Image: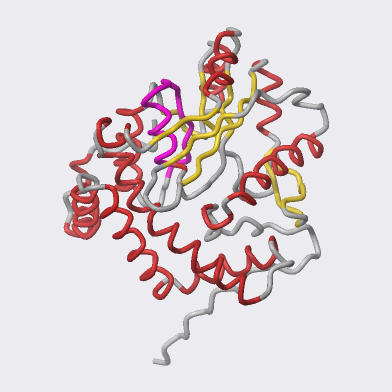
Amino acid sequence: MDDRYNLKQFWHPKFWGVWSMLSTLYLVAKLPYRLQMGLGAGLGWLMYRVMPIRKHFAEVNIGLCFPELSEVKQAKLVRDHFDSFGKATIETAMAWWSSDRQLAKLVSIKGLEHLKSAQASGQGVLMLSAHFTTLELGGRLLALTQPFQVSYKAHKKKPLFNEVMLRARERRFQKAISSKQPRDMIKSLKGGNILWYAPDQDYGRKQSVFAPFFGVPAITLTSTARIVKMTNALVVPFYVQRLPNGQGYQLIIEPALSAFPAGDDLVDAAAINALIERWVRLVPEQYLWVHRRFKTRPVGEAKFYRPKKKKKQKLI
């Protein structure tokens, strides 16, 4: 596969900073949970102050999705999101390197019977999730109880990070399938496997439609319905909530969707977005607001995000 690397390729000094960061995260993954969350909150505080572009994305997204909130409450939600975003960095390290024993005491599962029932049908199961800050750790926590396969999108601009992520997922899950290998995803589901899948990002106009998300037209993949139609898989919704006061995490699994797909790309995309929107409203600070969810706009509509400033050319 073209997105795999030999770690020996990354011994060059230009990667030493990344190695240092990964080594630090490895050590953090071994710390007590409350200390981990304290470090995550501190990291979020720092990110809020040193990541102006990401902060801008979060401000725009939250302003679009929660217009009913006052400016003061929107600003607080942005700050709370960065707190969650910082914790997500630590939680990613936990997902990759913390022991099963460390993690087992942090998790409770609601609705596992829905996943078991879908699996017992003999059909493939598309476990539908979304890009919450708890996404990476949530998958690892569920895998403690229920084995399953995962889909992933390669980070081409971060090859070392991508390789470490992929190796961690291959250790913790039955199989990791690239989003660029749809045939492998279809084969997995036709084989009766459970496949973890999160479609809620802006991947451009190809094989997508504009469907409402918090009332805003958002480019949305049609592949979810297409894959289900091709494989006769059941769609089981799954999301994660980080509980307050260091209580850990609740995993929520909902009953398999009925009457999906409906056969209309827009209707099916809107149904998925409405499902995710419902989850987001429960813990809005925990959704991943720092990416450009509304980057692609309908023809003729102005872009939402501030364009990057062009670098000034030096005069010779």
Q: Does residue 10 appear to the left or right of 72 in the view shown?
A: left
- The residue positioned 39% from the left and 59% from the top of the image is 86
How many numbered tags mark residues here? 0
Residue 272: percent from left, percent from top? 70, 38
In the image, which residues are magenta? Answer: 136-154
Magenta run includes residue 204: no
- The residue positioned 49% from the left and 35% from the top of the image is 251
Magenta run includes residue 143: yes
Residue 124: percent from left, percent from top? 58, 15
- The residue positioned 47% from the left and 30% from the top of the image is 109
Q: Does residue 263 appear to the left or right of 42 in the view shown?
A: right
Q: Based on the displayed image, in which of its 4 quarters is residue 111 positioned? A: top right
Q: Is residue 73 above or below residue 11?
A: below
Residue 89: percent from left, percent from top? 36, 53
- The residue positioned 24% from the left and 34% from the top of the image is 99
Q: Does residue 224 appear to the left or right of 10 in the view shown?
A: right
Residue 310: percent from left, percent from top? 52, 79
Q: Quadrant of the N terminus?
A: top left
Q: Nearer the viewer, residue 3 or 240?
A: 240
Q: Nearer the viewer, residue 87 or 305?
A: 87
